[in-house]
Image (cartoon, rainbow, N blue to C red):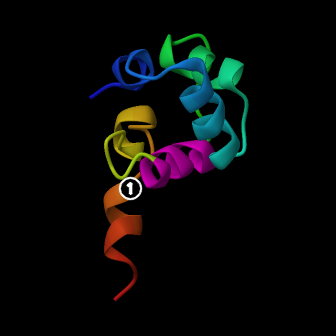
């Protein structure tokens, strides 16, 4: 699921709650969802966590090697 699809399922209160739990604003989430801004790595991780994996950080920032971070150092 894309971030824009996810946000369309939410009412304004839910969007505000998600934004606060991710440390950002509803406006910023919309900017990222519609491609006007790029999510920071931190926001991508926060969205992944706060949506229970519905929005994967890999989908928001494919330029980052998330596989390496998810596996951890061995």
Magenta-tinted stretch: 41-50
Above or below: residue 7 compared with residue 49: above
| Quadrant, the C terminus | bottom left
Q: Nearer the viewer, residue 6 or 39?
A: 6
Q: Nearer the viewer, residue 42 or 52?
A: 52
Q: Is residue 57 magenta?
A: no
| Residue 19 x/y as whole percent | 64, 36
| Residue 17 x/y as whole percent | 63, 38
Q: Quadrant of residue 8?
A: top left
| Quadrant, the N terminus | top left
State the predominant SS element of the stretch in magenta. Answer: helix
* Residue at image point 38% right, 78% down: 72
Q: Quadrant of residue 9?
A: top left
Above or below: residue 36 compared with residue 66: above
Q: Assign a secondary structure to mark 1.
A: helix
* Residue at image point 37% right, 25% down: 6
The local crowd at label 1, few if under 14, some if 14 to 19, many if 20 or more residues have their Cα within 10 Å, is: some
Q: Quadrant of residue 25?
A: top right
Above or below: residue 45 compared with residue 37: below
The residue that label 1 is drawn on is 66
| Residue 48 x/y as whole percent | 43, 49
């Amino acid at each position: 699921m894309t971030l824009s699809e996810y946000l369309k399922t939410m009412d304004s209160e839910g969007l505000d709650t998600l934004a606060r739990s991710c440390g950002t604003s509803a406006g910023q989430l919309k900017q990222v969802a519609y491609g006007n801004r790029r999510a920071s790595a931190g926001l991508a991780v926060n969205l992944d966590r706060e949506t229970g994996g519905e929005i994967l950080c890999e989908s928001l920032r494919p330029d980052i090697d998330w596989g390496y971070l998810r596996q951890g150092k061995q």
